[in-house]
Image (tube, coloured by chain):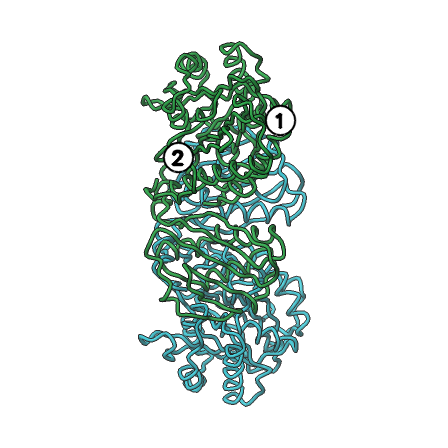
Chain colours: A green, B cyan
Amino acid sequence: MSGLTPVTVDGVDVSAGVTAARGFRAAGIPAGIKGGGKPDLALVVNDGPNVDAAGVFTRNVVKAAPVLWSKQVLTERRLRAVVLNSGSANAATGPPGFQDAHATAEKAAAVLGTGAIEIAVCSTGLIGERLPMQAVLPGIDTCAASLSASPSAATDAATAVLTTDSRPKQAAVTHADGWSIGGFAKGAGMLAPNMATMLSVITTDAVLGGEALDTVLRAASRVTFDRLDVDGGTSTNDTVLLLSSGASGIVPSVEEFTNLLSDMSLSLVRQLQADSEGATKLVDITVRGAPSETDAIQVGRTVAEDNLVKTALFGSDPNWGRIAMAVGRSQFAADPDRLGITVNGVELMRDGLASRDRSEADLSGARVEITIDLGAGTDQATIYSTDLSHGYVEENSAYSS
Amino acid sequence: MSGLTPVTVDGVDVSAGVTAARGFRAAGIPAGIKGGGKPDLALVVNDGPNVDAAGVFTRNVVKAAPVLWSKQVLTERRLRAVVLNSGSANAATGPPGFQDAHATAEKAAAVLGTGAIEIAVCSTGLIGERLPMQAVLPGIDTCAASLSASPSAATDAATAVLTTDSRPKQAAVTHADGWSIGGFAKGAGMLAPNMATMLSVITTDAVLGGEALDTVLRAASRVTFDRLDVDGGTSTNDTVLLLSSGASGIVPSVEEFTNLLSDMSLSLVRQLQADSEGATKLVDITVRGAPSETDAIQVGRTVAEDNLVKTALFGSDPNWGRIAMAVGRSQFAADPDRLGITVNGVELMRDGLASRDRSEADLSGARVEITIDLGAGTDQATIYSTDLSHGYVEENSAYSS
């Protein structure tokens, strides 16, 4: 856990979440999965009139049971509700674990008067342990009884999914035409989502069908959740869900919706980045001058995951030699003689050679902006990362997740 | 620095080094590159009768000036001597840096009465700084004056190349037929050599031509230096050189030579592993049941570089869920239902599911053996790695390298 202040994204309200859009209720309660009276079960319900939905999931080939379940139900692109739990990932649990995810959905469907095919399930916590169904099933009754469209209900849901996170992460935006998007996200470690972050549920009252929701969610995730890389650890449970109630009655343009969804998702990413395990620096790595966006991402992720770069940043050392080493070992064949590296506005390497003195780059603050110029094209991408601190080692050597 | 005892490789003498084979002299002195009177310049000379040689170098596209120089001279596959320095990597120094490497070789050639084309140069230290030639050039005179074939001269050379290493690493083997191989290596961080380790010089008095030396060096490096992965940081300066004096007059079989060279190189790798920055555990990751050796290496390296796995091991936690996560995010498309994970002899995951209880795997000692069974073939590979500790973060946030 770290106490960094997230980078603010203009126009995004971080005090509202999944109930900001009309047509949604939420709840979060302690169901006894974690023990100690901590909130660990959440429900987000779409009251319609529409129940269109889309989802993006982890690319890890080891997929948790709730991911397998939710991917399956989302082939219909309709969701009435999402059940989420912390305290157990229900991953590497085989067919019995899949049955547990199914039973969770059946229970929620019964309580809400619908079919299990319209219920997604998300889990987070320790890999390899079965879900304690004796706590989950009655918990769903309790959770359903406390459903509310209030802002505090959204916060309760955002809180019940936390693991090593120190605080809930929410964001909401409203378009001038009168439709809104809101959501929450969780995740503090094992954080290098690839098509999704650890867990995030986003709701909207704009009118978009399942196919349009799928398009806008992929477009927004690609430039927000997929650009976060704390430790290279693409989880077994990564999931982002987008639910539309259509309650505003307004049909937005896909472009406008994608833009607002991206702003709102970027705010969640900024909150995840600031609260990630042991982070003492918010590190943005922009790779420009790339022949393609894919190349820029490839180089940016290699630098973001490099422990020698990350520990130098923890030590507030603008060690551009380590950055050049990491660029050089990435899969992109950089031309070392065209390479440029700028740290917090000071150009330390230019055309492969030392430029201004490293002492001129001030890394004493909590924000670090690294710009790498490959001198090989016009494309670019930014990866959102952190440093590697004693706190990260401490949390991850002491906590089983 | 860590004080772990390296894993012993049978039949290898770790008290002898580059002067164990006949025909070689060495020296290591403080030349004032580092300051503080620390040894920082080494010379290894081949007195013949033969001067055959081969080398393998970093695959990082950002190559240091001495790597560019040494690769160039090795196209002739002949080396009379190697000049090595610590205190500066002479990397990202452009044409002036290349001139410095060239001038270093010219100076050594003049002192030894040969041409610069027969002199390799190796450097290690901070990236982006020029070599202090006013210290290097007179240092070569001093170094040449103290050349000796004694074991202590080999140790002096092995000591002069150290950076954050806590001790010199040497190894020597002698074949029953009467020929020997000896060498040293250095490296403690930025340690994931790809075709070579940070710096290593190996000598032999067996008779092998340049082409044969190239073949055996590549074969041995592929299964030793290339399997070491402490932090994924393939350096700009990685170099392994193999020099043959032929002084024994014996022509070995390529197979026997490769086997002994591999044993000796593995001993150096084991010493590098045990002395790597902040290591508290020696972690061997064996991936078996792979369709190809390349797949096994790919999976093993992903697990070896995973910070969540590494921190769990530092905490003596047999967290197989994190290992499964890392396998799942590697480029090899594993079948999660066939995956098996054994830690220190205890099978924790079998066919994708939890097997014996994690508490049965004892990780309290300094050695951790992880076996990952992909259930997809008959090939295998072992990666030699370490945990990720507070010591690693401390050294790499405080030391500029």
Q: CA distance from mark 1 to mark 2?
A: 26 Å
Q: Position of residue A58 (x, y in %)?
A: 56, 35
User: Looking at the picture, which amino acid does disc 2 mark?
Assistant: Val
Q: In this orientation, does residue B209 appear?
A: yes
Which comes sooner in the sequence, label 1 or label 2?
A: 2
> Which amino acid type is marked by label 1?
Gly
Residue B334, numbered circle: none
Query: Residue B205: x, y in percent?
Result: 58, 74
Is residue B260 at all visible to an observer of this figure?
no
Chain of the residue that carries numbered disc 2 in the rendered image: A
| Tally of numbered tags | 2
Residue B117 picture quarter: bottom right
Q: Is residue A130 above or below residue B388?
A: above
Badge 2: residue crowd in 10 Å (few <14, some 14–19, many ≥20): many
Left-right relation of A319 to B340: left
- The residue that appears at 51% across and 37% down in the rendered structure is A260
Q: Secondary structure at mark 2?
A: loop
Query: Which residue is painted at 40% across and 41% down in the image?
Result: A276
Name the residue carrying label 2. Answer: A14
Tell me the subunit letter for badge 1. Answer: A
How far across and down, in percent of the image, does residue B179 sit? 58, 71
Q: Is residue A214 left or right of residue B157?
A: right
**Pointer 1: what residue?**
A210
Q: Eyeballing the image, is A175 above or below A29?
A: below
